[in-house]
Image (cartoon, rainbow, N blue to C red):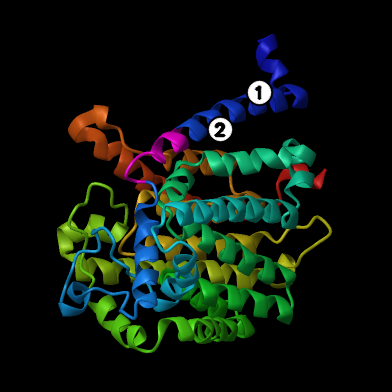
Amino acid sequence: MYGVRLLRQRPVQVAALGTLAVVVLVFRALQFAGLTREIQFGYDFSAYWLAGLSLVSGLSPYTAEQLAGPFSPQQAGLYLYPPPLAGGMAPLVRVFPQGFDAAVWIWTGLGAAILAAAVLALWRSERLGERFPILSGRGRWFLVAGAFAFPPVVGELVLGNVHLLLLGLLTLAWLGVRRGDLRGQEIAGLAVGAAAIVKVFPGLLIVWFLLTRRYTAAGGVVVGLAAVTLITLPLTGIEPWLQYPTVLANIGPPVDLRDTLAPTVWIATEVGFTVARILVTLIGLAILELGARRAIKAGDRDAVGTDGTWPETARSFAIAVTVSVLIAPALYHHYLALLVLPLILGLSAGVSLRWLAAAYLLMWGGEQGALGDASWVVNRLLPTLGALLLLSALIASRARVPAVARR
């Protein structure tokens, strides 16, 4: 029992957590190094780079198949996003015209830097070091280590998708909301607009802005969309914009369901893809409205106080981000890297640590070939349950200041 009592002492807790962090991070580093030599490295980034190459060559970033009729999004090299991201890749293509092998390392490094900066910015803005002694001072690096140990983050860094870029933009949006003034709303709106032009689903946050009566932020989303579009228009041209609505309309359901986490796809096996998509969207909007209503009801009681807390709004924004991810009809394990933001905001809002930890661990998932036909339980079912548990914890928990902050 003496050994158990020792765990109540902060130096012992720090030493134990530090040892665990080092072990896990070394494992993740070795895992990442191994995967960089596999076909997965840069798999998603290659589609963006090829889209930029097409623009530089005077071609459309979208294929004839995408424009001709329904197609499965699970094909190598398909570009599925609005044109500006492809336009943003054009300078990289000009620097590395022979291939994307070097460019992908720049993209991966940028993603890692954005992740670290976002976590540290949230640690600072939410004053987590003051409210949780183990995270004070150098303890902030435990939070960064937890983010880099998160398997969806490793997958994101390996595949080179855009979700760490989105994490940075949505973190900037929250910091704008956190300011509590019109300037902050402008920043938040512009950040969400930029995120939505990269990938459509963050645009759902404009609904949250409207529901929480942040009309300046909602207008900022439109301005951000327009600004990024105009800035990249000389690189993209008009034609890809005319083609993109057709591409969106032609995207069909995933054919291979082994790695698909989207609630829409789970339900589609029973009611069909279109009905499932509508149903999940309606449920998501209802949850979004519930969280927004709670934030509005909190009113003056939710103002930033001397303890640095803003729990109900933090929880509501975390719900909105989580819903935006879960209603996307194409959702894979590495997409969950974006949930680093609602996990930290849940901690800030006083959501039960045990539920946040359970959700975090359930989302570890990953390929487990040794399980054979049952591998879907680990790489599909558990991460889906983890994301849903996070959303449920954010909804059900009463936002509050953690007891340590009131001492």
Q: Which residue does the image show at 32% across and 68% down from the upper left?
A: 79
Looking at the image, can residue 135 be seen? yes
Horizontal and vertical percent for residue 233?
47, 85
Residue 403, image x, y percentages: 73, 43
How many labels sit on residues? Answer: 2
Q: Quadrant of the N terminus?
A: top right
Local SS, label 2: helix
Quarter of the figure with residue 303: bottom right
Locate the C terminus by quadrant: top right
Q: Mark 1 — residue?
A: 16
Q: Residue at x 66, y 71 (%)?
A: 177
Magenta-colored stretch includes residue 314: no
**Picture quarter containing residue 148?**
top right
Which of 269/20 is in front? 20
Instruction: Tell me residue 96's x, y (percent).
Output: 46, 61
Which residues, given as a range, are shown in magenta? Answer: 31-40
Residue bearing the label numbered 2: 25
- Image point 66% across, 54% down: which residue? 117
Question: The disc labelled 1 sits on which kind of residue?
Answer: Ala
Per the model, the C-alpha gap separating discs 1 and 2 is 14 Å
Q: Residues within 10 Å of mark 2 (few under 14, many from 20)?
A: some
Q: Answer above or below: position of 360 versus 4.
A: below
Kind of residue indicated by mark 2: Leu
Left or right? Give the position of 129 relative to 367: right
